[in-house]
Image: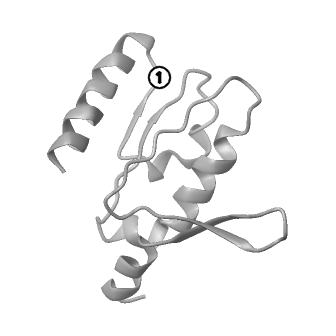
């Protein structure tokens, strides 16, 4: 893929299928995604769909992945993918503050 392909990918990332089986695309360019939910709610299906589909853009530095993994298992499978992975509870708030600062400056 050339850089143009990676830039196009950011406009509409195919991450799922809707109820009719049609591809559902999530816009990324100019957006920030924050996935939260209770245990068992399926957060990681969204997370890994984005991580894998955005891989070409991540490899050329167009996106960054930050993860917080309190169970030490959800993101461990893809250790090499994460720009920042935080496990200790005491650093979560600091991470989220940094993410907010970066999002506001983008």
In the image, residue 51 above or below residue 10:
above
Tell me which residue sits at (42%, 72%) in the image: 11
Q: Relative to the observer, which residue lies in front, 2 or 25?
A: 25
Measuring from the top left, give residue 82's x and y in whole percent.
42, 47
Quarter of image, res 4: bottom left
Measuring from the top left, give residue 93's x and y in whole percent.
34, 17
Tell me which residue sits at (74%, 32%) in the image: 41
Q: Relative to the observer, which residue lies in front, 11 or 91?
A: 11
Which secondary structure lies at badge 1? loop
Tell me which residue sits at (29%, 35%) in the image: 99
Q: Name the outermost residue toward the top.
A: 90
In the image, residue 92 above or below residue 66:
above
Quarter of image, res 67: top left
Q: Which residue is mark 1?
A: 87
Structure colour scheme: one colour
**Left or right of 86: which side holds 76?**
right
Q: Name the outermost residue toward the right.
A: 20
Q: Relative to the observer, which residue lies in front, 36 or 65?
A: 36
Quarter of the N terminus within the rendering:
bottom left
């Amino acid at each position: 893929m050339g850089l143009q392909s990676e830039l196009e990918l950011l406009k509409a990332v195919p991450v799922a299928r809707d109820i009719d089986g049609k591809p559902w695309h999530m816009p990324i360019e100019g957006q920030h995604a924050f996935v939260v939910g209770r245990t068992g709610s399926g957060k990681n299906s969204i997370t890994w769909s984005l991580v894998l589909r955005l891989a070409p853009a991540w490899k050329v530095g167009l996106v960054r992945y930050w993860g917080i993994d309190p169970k030490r298992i959800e993101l461990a499978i893809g250790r090499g993918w994460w720009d920042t992975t935080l496990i200790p509870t005491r650093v979560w708030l600091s991470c989220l503050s940094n993410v907010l600062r970066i999002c506001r400056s983008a």
